[in-house]
Amino acid sequence: MKEILEEYYNINITEYIEDKNSLLFQVNGINYYLVKTFYDESYINELIRLCEEVRRQKVLLHDFIKNKYNGYLSNGYVLFKINILIDEIDLKDIESFNNIDCNKYLKEYIKMEDFWQNKIDYFEIQVSELSNNQLINHSFDYYIGIVEIIILFLKKNPYPIDLCLSHKTLDSLKTIDFYNPLNITFDLKLKDMASYIRMTNNYELLGNLLDNINYQDKTYLFTRMVFPFRYFNIISDMVIDKEEEQELIKILNRVNEYERYVSKIQRMFGIYLFSWIKKE
């Protein structure tokens, strides 16, 4: 990745933090972030307009930096100047995104149940055609069963759609990608809140939230609290990108832990979807 900086930006660095698909470094005391992307220039331009829009509402996303060829894509990478570098996400960060009204994008919004119905259909094809991995084959039906129950539950219990600025993924309390435009989307306020509660295990916050939202919002929040997102992220990597199996093994070794967690969430919400999981 250093070669990308040299070729496209005339930047030479000796000190940096490198990850699988990204590079974090400083120049003259300013933090920069080089990261791989699969988006095209047209989508990048849309994100730049979004960054300008949310800046007016007091949220500073990372700034896209043009390369020496006057473009933003550099052999599949983009470079950002970092405006806010946080060590840990806190509730104020979540709330700052929740306060940005994005309902003008309602026509583009795909509801959770529709998104995951399409994704599950895709996974089933991929697993049947491409996977000879026994770990996937022996666990897939279990997790598909959970998702199908959740999808049916959401279809039977419609919830209000009120969009705010949100994240495509939010699975780490220490992340540079919280303010990364590539990770931005439009979704319900409870999406990021559910991820935050799952990361922090803040059940006091969850209890307070349940005291102040209606049943329709509770149904949506419940599904985001119990959904096995991590499993499907991992098998997506394994089937499509041929990633290692170790992360999947960790998930499968924690099935009992996951079921105890789901049991606790069911009890807190008073919603019992999974008959084989003990109420405790």
Image (cartoon, helix red, strand yellow):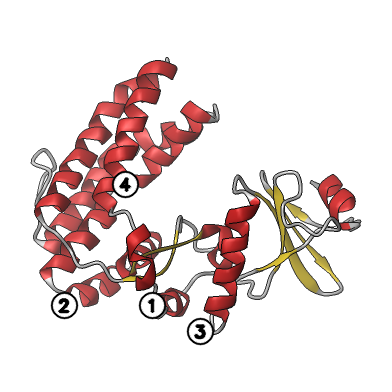
Earlier sequence position, callout 2 versus callout 3? 3
For the residues labelled 2 and 3, say whether their Cβ atoms are less than 8 Å apart.
no
Which residue type does callout 2 highlight?
Asp
Q: What residue did someone put label 3 on? A: 57
The CA distance from mark 4 to mark 1 is 22 Å
Earlier sequence position, callout 1 versus callout 2? 1
Q: What residue did someone put label 1 on? A: 101
Q: In the drawing, does residue 194 fall left or right of residue 97?
A: left
For the residues labelled 1 and 3, say whether their Cβ atoms are less than 8 Å apart.
no
Q: What residue did someone put label 4 on? A: 115
Of residues 280 and 91, the one drawn nearer to the viewer in this rendering: 91
Is the residue 40 above or below the residue 122 in the image? below
Is the residue 247 above or below the residue 29 in the image? above
Earlier sequence position, callout 4 versus callout 2? 4
Q: Pointer 2: residues within 10 angstroms few (<14), some, or many (20+)?
A: few
Q: In the drawing, does residue 59 fall left or right of residue 72?
A: left
Q: In the drawing, does residue 255 fall left or right of residue 53?
A: left
The CA distance from mark 1 to mark 3 is 10 Å
Disc sitting over residue 211 in the figure: 2
Is the residue 14 above or below the residue 106 in the image? above
Disc sitting over residue 79 in the figure: none
Is the residue 148 above or below the residue 18 in the image? above
Query: Which quadrant holds residue 48?
Result: bottom right
The CA distance from mark 4 to mark 2 is 29 Å
The CA distance from mark 1 to mark 2 is 24 Å
The CA distance from mark 4 to mark 3 is 29 Å
Which residue type does callout 4 highlight?
Phe
Which residue is located at x 88 percent, y 49 percent?
A: 7
**Mark 4 or mark 2, which is nearer to you?**
4
